[in-house]
Amino acid sequence: MIASPLAGKPDWVVWGLLAIAGVLLLARLDNGLLWQDEAETALLARHVLRFGYPRVSDGRSPMEIVSPYTHGPDEAWIYSPWAPFYLLAGVFAVFGESTAIARAPFALCGWLSIWLAWQLARHAGFSRQVQRLTVALLTFSVPVLLHMRQCRYYGMVTAIVLAICWLYLAWDERPTWPRSLGLGMLLGALFHNELRNLHSGRMCAGVPLPAVGVAEVALAMVDDRDGSRRADRAMGGRVLSAGHLC
């Protein structure tokens, strides 16, 4: 991978886009009540604080969804992995409960996802134009913003997937025990966020397609060490295609 003469200088265009993304993701999170899936996440997080685990009932009002596989022994929730509930339970314990607070940690994960997509593009050696395109597509994609602002696992899963790809590239260049441990922890975190989609072959169900495009092309082109324009054109085409699909 050939170092660019601009590699060590801050890219203020990207940082400006990240600032815009922060505003778009975090502004007016209290606008509108939690809808069905969001309320499910928030209620289960509340039950974690009360019972120590996500329980489908508080003793008075049981949660009911279409699937018959909602709970197991002691009314423990089994329909989806528990990591988002424990994350939100920790936030509720510190900041209290409200609509904005329920959405905030997942919106922050959404912002982190955009930053990680940029870092992944940088680490793979793509030009500044492609890096800016990556961040811009994610920042101004309405479906991405709508998903990331929800009190739901989407932002967490996207951030974890991109972090795994980024750390894998670093590990591939120089394997170390800390990087191996970090990869193992991230893979474990992904398992506890996306178990349903992992076993059903829908791993990317909660990950915005532009982020998938970044990860796919970065991993595919990482062995192209001459920094050729071919890599940049491939990256731009894939990300544009993914952004169009969103």
Image (cartoon, rainbow, N blue to C red):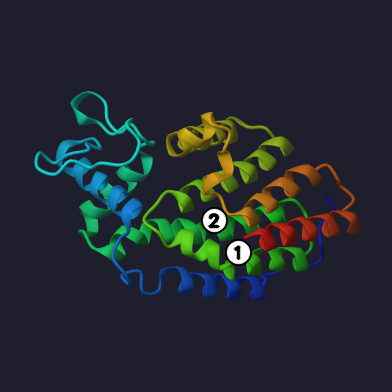
Residue 102 % position (x, y): 30, 58
Q: Is residue 133 above or below residue 83?
A: below
Q: Are marks 1 and 2 in contact (CB under 8 Å)?
A: yes
Residue density around tag 1, few if under 14, some if 14–19, many if 20 or more, within 10 Å = many
Specify the amino acid type for callout 2: Ser
Q: Quadrant of residue 50?
A: top left
Residue in the image at 47% along x and 64% along y: 146
Considering every residue shown, the one lying at the far top of the view is: 73
Q: Quadrant of the C terminus?
A: bottom right
Residue underneath mark 1: 138
Residue 239 % position (x, y): 72, 58
Residue underneath mark 2: 113
Considering every residue shown, the one lying at the far left of the view is: 60
Confirm whether residue 24 shows in the render: yes
Q: CA distance from mark 1 to mark 2?
A: 9 Å
Q: Secondary structure at mark 1?
A: helix
Residue density around tag 2, few if under 14, some if 14–19, many if 20 or more, within 10 Å = many
Drawn side of residue 167 relative to residue 148, left or right: right
Confirm whether residue 228 shows in the render: no
